């Protein structure tokens, strides 16, 4: 998969996407991430990319031209399956959406700032608008990093144990069961006996039951 990201703050995306699983995905050639600084596409003095909003009001709006230049120059080289705008008024990201996007080939992501982008870009270029939750961030970069991570770890071959994404929370609309590691006992706190039994059928049943219990208690809306 190839993901291109257009942003005014490329530095903000560098670190979250160059460690751990995202690093491995790129090293294995399973995920290519290209970050494009928006200011490079401005033809104005001081590489300006924002301007006052028509109708008045506080806050700047990201201008049409630099974004259109960036999108069109990328589209001339690459066929995108989706052009995604990260915005708090988009569709809320969930596991199902991440699963669906992980099946695509090329994605283009646009990070908003200030009061957002000129509506005409949304009308004419954007195919999908995504929010990572009901709160407002200073910009779309952290949202894009979250989205790339959620998608990238699902690409076949990225996780060591291919089944591990299948046992994550939210797959099957259930939260993941509790997990334990050594030691078997610490300060008198014991690991549930069943996990030490070696009976994998029983362990699977126990885990499934714990998942249902946890989901009932914490996220009954998922059931
Ligand atoms: N930009 C600002 N807030 C955001 C959010 N919640 N999700 C995605 N992009 C954003």
Image (spheres, helix red, strand yellow):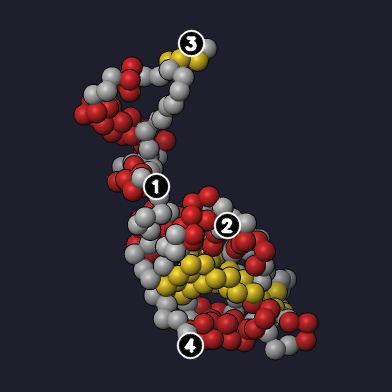
Tell me where residue 56 appears, x and y as whole percent: 71, 78
Is there CB contact under 8 Å for labels 3 and 1? no
Residues 89 and 208: in front is 208
Q: Earlier in the sequence, mark 1 or mark 4?
A: 4
Residue tagged by mark 2?
A: 18
Q: Which mark is residue 188?
A: 3
Left or right placement of residue 184 versus residue 68 in this view: left
Q: Give the structural element (helix, strand or loop) at label 1.
A: loop
Residue tagged by mark 4?
A: 76
Q: Is residue 14 above or below residue 198?
A: below
Q: CA distance from mark 4 to mark 3?
A: 64 Å
Within 10 Å of disc 3 (Cα), the crowding (few <14, some 14-19, many 20+) is few
Within 10 Å of disc 4 (Cα), the crowding (few <14, some 14-19, many 20+) is few
Q: Is residue 222 above or below residue 95?
A: above
Q: CA distance from mark 3 to mark 2?
A: 40 Å
Q: CA distance from mark 4 to mark 2?
A: 27 Å
Q: Give the structural element (helix, strand or loop) at label 3.
A: loop
Picture residue at 54% right of the left edge, 86% below the top? 73
Is there CB contact under 8 Å for labels 4 and 3? no
Tell me where residue 1 appears, x and y as whole percent: 41, 67
Within 10 Å of disc 1 (Cα), the crowding (few <14, some 14-19, many 20+) is few
Quarter of the picture containing the C terminus is top left
Q: Is residue 12 visible?
A: yes
Within 10 Å of disc 2 (Cα), the crowding (few <14, some 14-19, many 20+) is some
Q: CA distance from mark 2 to mark 1?
A: 17 Å
Residue tagged by mark 1?
A: 160
Q: Which mark is residue 218?
A: none
Q: Earlier in the sequence, mark 4 or mark 2?
A: 2
Closer to the observer: label 1 or label 4?
Answer: 1
Closer to the observer: label 3 or label 1?
Answer: 1
């Amino acid at each position: 998969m190839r993901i291109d990201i257009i942003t005014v703050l490329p530095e903000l995306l560098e670190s979250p996407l160059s460690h751990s699983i995202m690093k491995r995905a790129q090293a294995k050639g399973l995920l290519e991430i290209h970050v494009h600084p928006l200011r490079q596409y401005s033809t104005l003095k001081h590489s300006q990319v924002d301007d006052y909003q028509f109708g008045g009001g506080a806050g700047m709006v990201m201008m049409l031209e630099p974004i259109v230049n960036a999108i069109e120059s990328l589209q001339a080289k690459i066929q995108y399956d989706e052009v995604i705008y990260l915005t708090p008024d988009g569709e809320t990201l969930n596991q199902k959406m991440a699963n669906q996007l992980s099946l695509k080939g090329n994605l283009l992501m646009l990070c908003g700032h200030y009061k957002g982008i000129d509506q005409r870009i949304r009308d004419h270029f954007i195919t999908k608008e995504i929010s990572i939750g009901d709160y407002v961030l200073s910009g779309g970069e952290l949202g894009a990093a979250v989205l790339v991570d959620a998608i990238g770890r699902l690409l076949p071959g990225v996780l060591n144990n291919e089944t591990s994404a299948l046992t994550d929370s939210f797959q099957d609309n259930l939260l993941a069961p509790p997990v334990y590691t050594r030691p078997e006992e610490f300060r008198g706190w014991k690991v549930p006996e069943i996990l030490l039994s070696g009976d994998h059928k029983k362990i699977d049943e126990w885990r499934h039951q714990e998942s249902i219990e946890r989901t009932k208690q914490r996220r009954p809306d998922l059931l």
